[in-house]
Amino acid sequence: MLREIPTHLIGGPLGAGKTSLIRALLAQKPGGERWAVLVNEFGEIGLDAALLATQADGVAIGEVAGGCLCCVNGVPFQVGLGRLLRRARPDRLFIEPSGLGHPLALWKQLQAAPWAGVLALQPPVLVLDAAALAAGEPLPEAQEQALAVAGLVLLNKSEALDAAQRATATARLPAVPVRWGVGGRLALADLPGGAPQPRSEARWAALPDAPAELPLLLCADRPLRAVREQDGQLAIGWRLAPSVRFERAGVEAWLRRLSGLRRAKAVLRCADGWYAVNAAPLVDNWVKSSWRRDNRLELILEPGHDEEALERAFLACRMVAQ
């Protein structure tokens, strides 16, 4: 096993900016270190790994799609984390649970077997929407509970707040270090916990493992669709072959018209290259992506939508000439 890997749990509500924070931290990775990221999301398609795709050396990304990482004793989590550690042998590990998950339960359970002695768990980082906090919007109960053990709160999306609004936001927090952020940016030096230390490597056999998943054969005209409904949330997503190209403006226009949209994530091949977006709910902040494996889109909406109609509308955004 690897021993005492500095491990950072990045929690926060849906859409607060957790993935943006991890992207910002990955950009600061020292050249001589190996980092790993395990991400979980509510849906089944697995978008966060695609959104975090990077061409940088020394970064390995694993994912556990569907459900909640708070069930650390479940097979998907055990296998996902064990496989990632075997593959990456990282100097530092980041874990991003779903915004609908329970970070406090996860943080406590990561201190038990088989991870005790393998992971050097640091105080969690919570990413909160500063504007929503200042406006008095309630925090989900699971995130409120996690504040009790947080080592740092990143108040993201704070660029439009004045001094009075910032005071209102911080008054709702316990005595915990706070950083104000825009776009999830945080200096690596502000991350709770120390730098990776030299370690000896011992047995790997004790880490949970399973056979590798077989690759999927994706078609250009028939997308793979995955649907999950739980706790008043509908997650629906699609994967298509990488040869398919989309009209970015068409995707934006469709999603603007879509009622009950709470979040949209995508990595799509467009006319001028591959682009990623991670937005709630407006979809207009596309960025270039190094992902090339397939096209992916996932939506989190209010329940009650016609799945077939959603798929037809998505496919209508494809470029005519492929």
Image (tube, helix red, strand yellow):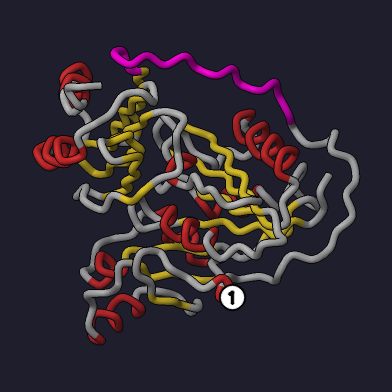
Q: Compared to 215, does 126 lie above or below?
A: below
Q: Is residue 274 magenta?
A: no
Q: Is residue 30 visible?
A: yes
Please report the residue visible at 34 percent of the width from the left and 20 percent of the height from the top.
225
Camera-nearest residue between 174 and 198: 198
Could you classify mark 1 by the number of other residues whose Cα lies within 10 Å: few (under 14), some (14-19), or many (20 or more)? few
**Farthest residue toward the left?**
257
Camera-nearest residue between 317 and 64: 317
Q: Position of residue 321 (x, y in %)?
A: 20, 22
Query: Is 84 situated left or right of 38 in this image?
Result: right
Residue matched to label 1: 189
**Where is the N terminus found, in terms of image quarters?**
top right
Please report the residue visible at 79 percent of the width from the left and 66 percent of the height from the top.
197
Q: Position of residue 3 (x, y in %)?
A: 82, 53
How many numbered discs sit on the rendered protein?
1
Q: Is residue 219 magenta?
A: yes
Q: Locate residue 91: give its quadrant.
A: bottom right
Camera-nearest residue between 106 and 307: 307
Secondary element type, mark 1? helix
Q: Type of residue at label 1?
A: Ala
Please report the residue visible at 72 percent of the width from the left and 51 percent of the height from the top.
90
Q: Is residue 101 visible?
A: no
- Magenta region: 209-223
Q: Position of residue 265 (x, y in %)?
A: 32, 41
